[in-house]
Image: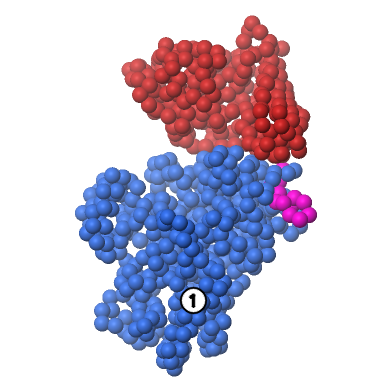
Chain colours: A blue, B red
Amino acid sequence: MSEIRHFDEMWGRTEEVRGPYRELDGWIKGEDPARLRAKQREAEELFRLTGITFNVYGRDEAEERLIPFDIIPRIMSGAEWRKLCRGIEQRVRAINQFLYDIYHRQEIIRAGRIPAEMIERNAAFLPQMCGVNPPGGIYTHIVGIDLVRTGEDQFYVLEDNARTPSGVSYMLENRETMLHMFPELFAQNKVRPVSNYPTDLRRSLAACAPTMTTGRPTVAVLTPGIFNSAYFEHAFLADQMGVELVEGQDIRIIDGRVAMRTTCGYKPIDVLYRRVDDDYLDPLNFRPDSQLGVPGIMDVYRAGGITIANAPGTGIADDKAIYSYMPDIVEFYTGERPLLENVPTWRCAEADAFAYVREHLHELVVKEVHGSGGYGMLVGPTATKKDIAEFRKKFEARPANYIAQPTLSLSTVPIFNRAGLTPRHVDLRPFVQVSPQGINITPGGLTRVALKKGSLVVNSSQGGGTKDTWVLDD
Amino acid sequence: MRLNIRHVTTYSFEDPVAYGLQQLRKTPKSTWGQTVTEWQTDVAGGAKEVSFEDHHNNVVELISFERQATKVVVTSTGVVEIDDTAGVMGKHKGPSPLWLYLRSTPLTHVGPGVRALVRTAREADSDLDKLHKLMAAIRDVVAYEVGSSYPDWTAEQAIEEGRGVCQDHTHIFAAAARELGFPARYVSGYLMLDDRLAQDAMHAWAEAHVDGLGWVGFDVSNSISPDTRYVRVATGLDYHEAAPVTGTRIGGADETLRVDIEVAQQ
């Protein structure tokens, strides 16, 4: 540990093991590295058997790949977690109020806190949602906020993922694998469970059922089908929640409801957790060429006959250009100072920002405004001259399509490799459920780790791996 | 003026329809200068599923076809009372923000044809003058010819061809008005032609939003602003959003559509 520029969550900046990691440290010291190496291989084999793989976009064939798993858990104390949760709750409340406002009176624009063109020119603004009141007033039922840490107390939100956060199946499988392989660790450490996630999700979704629901609400998961890169997760979640997994072709509009085919005829759905994007959700109301959606579902939704989770049009809140206004958004709706930091962001649509960014590409992270998954992004400090030159062409042709951020000094957590414990950069995606009954955050989340030394890109599509994430019950 | 309206659409299919839905925007609402005293829509060969008001404030009804239907008949009848407002429809009410009506759509895409029309209207004293000039300019360039255009023609295509129907005139007007900075929308509705009971089709005209006045109607095909013979039924950014019927179905090859519309003064 010669160059301690980054905050390491196990060793801090001083090489004295931090509190939450003490038990783990003692355990590792008592283990034979050869046994741990064997365990690491065993973990990989387990994942292959469970079949958690994902398709990598942008390749000739949809190649199935395993996301590497690292056996060293990422650990947070109860106090750290509680503090983080307060920030997440505040942010999620603000996002829901923002969405309600944007699709109603747009007070935040009238108040001059967001320029009108940020919404007017935004492809994620869905006119069909204007004036719609989603059941329970909830737009984002499931949120997966991406956070990074830069110090003992500094957390930054990278992205809000208010649309369709994925990855929760990894959180669950990672824990299951660790419990299976290292039961002794869970005896030494009091780790809060994550296994309630599917039950909690089902309960949270059911609490969002439309008012016309009678009896126990029927929940279902809508998937685009087996060719979708996250199909495994859709099937997994439906199975874990004990609800039906449906595709558009299984659904009809019957008696004013959205009904799915079952072995005993068509049954109305009260809450649909949809993993189909807005554009494809309803060929009668959106893209007519969509084969994946449910014709007429928007009509039933607007008549109050179904809850769609997340609500159509929520994408406006996780647009990267809107992101830069999140501190204002939080203040405007909650009247409080934001508890979580936003990464300072240059909006390249603005002339000054563009001028600065084009001169500093080599030190900035530049992202597409509407992109996700780490595609089409430039990480200046680690990019080659050729990468930068190529990126510059695209960037200068359409500056408004980009935002830029400073390279944060992301925290590290050790991974276990041939050299033993080696620090690697991580991020964290906690999973949040929102219903009229409250906001529930599963203790833990998905920790993604950049496996390449020095790399800051944790996206699984770009060679990142995952770790189990522990919140201690202390 | 009090108008009696009867509007029947009959869809027939050679092969039965396995599953089909139609979105209807066929119900006029009481708004500025227009009072709907009676209105009823009946469906034969199908069932009403839900009804709601969309983001343009239109009443929308979703109907499903009966299993194996070969014919679906939708009959709307009612009485609407109209006051003369000189085409002024008043303040924008939402729920969509006014700026939405500055958005262009594929049918109202602005190209060289629309831009040329915009240039002729730019030099005018007032907003209203500009829009009236625009209306006249469109009539000069695009002749009204019944049956001369295709329903999927864009504003630019109609200008190129130099002919069109009310739908084309309305698309051109909306595109050009937006280019001039006026929020504009497509209106689908009824026009009572004095010399006959049976009307050929629904009519279409445009509305532009003028500061101080609110929405103002322009019927390019007839070179006037709507008067007491006009019944507003639905609005949208273009024909697709205001169309009386939008459908989707599985099965049901060889569709034939018959439309019967009667508008009479009571």
Q: Nearer the viewer, residue A108 or B201?
A: B201
Q: Is residue B52 left or right of residue B66?
A: left
User: Residue at 53% of width from left, 68% of height from top?
Assistant: A52
Is residue A326 among the parts visible in the rendering?
no
Question: x, y percentage for residue B54?
Answer: 59, 37
Tag 1 secondary structure: helix
Is residue A316 among the parts visible in the rendering?
yes
Q: Residue furthest bottom?
A: A30
User: Residue at 29% of width from left, 48% of height from top?
Assistant: A394
Question: x, y percentage for residue B237?
Answer: 50, 31
Tell whether position A264 is magenta.
yes
Q: Which amino acid does the dot numbered 1 rest on?
A: Glu
Q: A292 above or below B15?
A: below
Q: Is residue B30 left or right of residue B206?
A: right
Magenta-drawn stretch, dominant element (helix, strand or loop): strand
Q: Nearer the viewer, residue A229 or A319?
A: A229
Q: Quadrant of the N terminus of chain A?
A: bottom left
- Give the magenta range: A256-267
Q: Read off the residue under disc 1.
A: A44
Question: x, y percentage for residue A294?
Answer: 62, 46
